Structures are given as C-alpha cells and as structure tokens.
Amino acid sequence: MFEVALLFLIIALFVVCAFLPIGSNPLLPFKSSQQPGVVNDACADLEATDSEDSPPKQHFLMYLQNEIESALFPRPTDSVLQRHYDALIRAELDNRLAAMPDS
C-alpha cells in the first residue's frame, strides 16, 4: 500500500510541475516571457550584438519592438509558434529599420 501511495504522490508532483507556468516555478531560475516587463527573445540577439550601443538606441529598439507587438496578435504559448512569432517580429523590426533614413 505504501508503494501505491508513493507512486501516486510522485505522479501528482510530476503533473503539477508539468502544468505550472515556467515563471511561477521556483525550481527554474529563468523567467517566462509571458510576464509583462520581460524583454522577448526576438530582440535579444540584436541587443547582444549591439551591447556597446548607447542606452537611447536600445530603448528605441525596445520601443519599436513593443510597437510591432502591440499591432500583432498575443504571443502564442506553443514553443514552435513562439519561434515563428519571434521571427515575424524580427523580420518586421528589420524592415522598419531598413526603411528609416540614415542620420
């Protein structure tokens, strides 16, 4: 009987951990991208390559990314769809930056 109870507790723990959002799981150190105020992955590689840029340029890129995201549908929860969503945002960000005149 003890083995059955232990197996039930292990399965219940696994199910609870599997369905918790990543941001609220205290065992994982990273934050979910669904939380407000968290920079999405779509601009993370751009910021990594432009780390020596001035803060106003980084703020402008974040503002432009937020403007693009506000015009689109909400961020999907599926990981494959998130990659496509990030690629869509990145492509639109590149298009808008390419259309801007050099100053």
Image (spheres, rainbow, N blue to C red):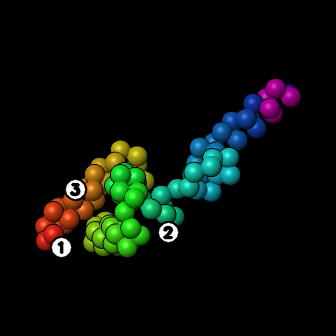
Residue 40 horizontal/vertical position (percent)? 42, 59
Of circles 2 and 1, the one toward us is 1
Give the secondary structure at mark 3.
Answer: helix
Residue 28 has which mark? none
| Labels 3 & 2 near each other (Cβ < 8 A) | no
Q: Which residue is mark 2?
A: 37
Of circles 3 and 1, the one toward us is 1
**What amino acid is at disc 3?**
Ala
Q: Earlier in the sequence, mark 3 or mark 1?
A: 3
| In front of the other: 59 or 73 | 59
| Labels 2 & 1 near each other (Cβ < 8 A) | no
What's the magenta region?
2-6
**What amino acid is at disc 1?**
Ser
Say if residue 62 shows up in the picture. Answer: no
Name above or below for residue 18 compared with residue 77: above
Give the secondary structure at mark 1.
Answer: loop
Please give the name of the residue rendered at 59% of the width and 43% of the height, measured from the top-left corner.
18
Task: Classify residue 8 as left or right of residue 53.
Answer: right
Q: Which residue is mark 3?
A: 91
Q: Which residue is mark 1?
A: 103
Say if residue 29 shows up in the picture. Answer: yes
Q: CA distance from mark 2 to mark 1?
A: 30 Å
Q: Main secondary structure of the magenta part?
A: helix
Give the secondary structure at mark 2.
Answer: loop
| In front of the other: 64 or 76 | 64
